[in-house]
Amino acid sequence: MALNGQLEGIVNLSERWRTSAQRSNFLELTARGYMTWRRRSLSLLTGSPLPLEREAAYFIALCAPQAGQSWLDVGTSAGFYAGILARRGAQVLACDISPAMLREAARQETHPNISYALLNAEQTGLPAASFDGVCIGATLNETASPPDMLAEAQRLLKPGGQLWLMALARDGSPGQGLLSRLGGLTFADEAQLAAWLPGLAQTDGWRRGNVLFGRWIKR
Ligand SMILES: C[S@@+](CC[C@H](N)C(=O)[O-])C[C@H]1O[C@@H](n2cnc3c(N)ncnc32)[C@H](O)[C@@H]1O
């Protein structure tokens, strides 16, 4: 794994704030099997076919990432969003707190436009207004403090920059309650997201079952 040299000094990894879900992503086995799960995950979670190709097409249609733009992929795992962005010509900083995930991403997505970095996306230490776009694909559910992650994404966006979010929304089910207690997962609804994104305006939103997709613009 090649870390971007200038970022090596600002890794912020503290055992204290990791959720159980985050810790599970440190396992080599989880990282190796991640894409096998990811390919099927949204179809299984929504109960109707929602392949990666459809998710990618929706992301591209709404966000229209372009050559020369700079994007942050928050919690890249195996590099799914980073790969889409890089193939559209964007420069991508793909971050994750799991070294195992970053190694897997670097194996699967070798596009030269991607730099991988071991970073806590709740507090990156990167300069404000660094990115034209930030994408958060399911990482919000896992992180210890979703409001901190969204506040950091807002800080990192340039004015007019866009945020893309794919997340599991709150449905109040006993299953989600159990996952919250045991795994430290957070499930937010649209109203909660709006409250956590005070400086952004939502332009698009789509919900299939309890999976939501949305695009916001920084005012
Ligand atoms: C559910 S996976 C999402 C993967 C990817 N975005 C996708 O759409 O396929 C969540 C990933 O985010 C990482 N992660 C969780 N909390 C994070 C944080 N605070 N900062 C950076 N990465 C984080 C995990 O290690 C894991 O690889």
Image: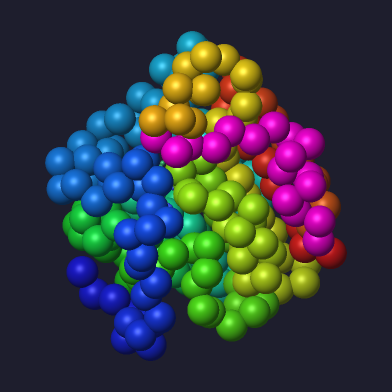
Q: Is residue 89 left or right of residue 101?
A: right
Q: Is residue 207 left or right of residue 199?
A: left
Applied colour scheme: rainbow
Q: Nearer the viewer, residue 110 or 35?
A: 35
Q: Nearer the viewer, residue 65 or 180?
A: 180
Residue 13 picture location, percent across and down? 35, 67
Q: Nearer the viewer, residue 212 or 52?
A: 212
* Residue shown at the point (48%, 49%) measured from the top left: 143
Q: Is residue 47 left or right of residue 157?
A: left
In magenta, the rendered stretch is: 183-199
Q: Is residue 121 left or right of residue 209?
A: left
* Residue shown at the point (49%, 63%) measured from the top left: 121
Residue 208 picture location, percent across and down? 62, 21
Q: Quadrant of the C terminus?
A: bottom right
Q: Quadrant of the N terminus?
A: bottom left
Magenta segment: does it hold 19? no
Magenta segment: does it hold 189? yes
* Residue shown at the point (33%, 59%) measured from the top left: 15
Query: From this viewpoint, is residue 60 visible?
Result: no
* Residue shown at the point (22%, 40%) measured from the top left: 30
Residue 216 picture location, percent across and down? 74, 51
Query: From this viewpoint, is residue 205 visible?
Result: yes
Residue 203 picture location, percent across and down? 80, 46
| Total numbered labels | 0
- Looking at the picture, does residue 157 appear above or below residue 32? below
- Looking at the picture, does residue 175 appear above or below residue 85? above
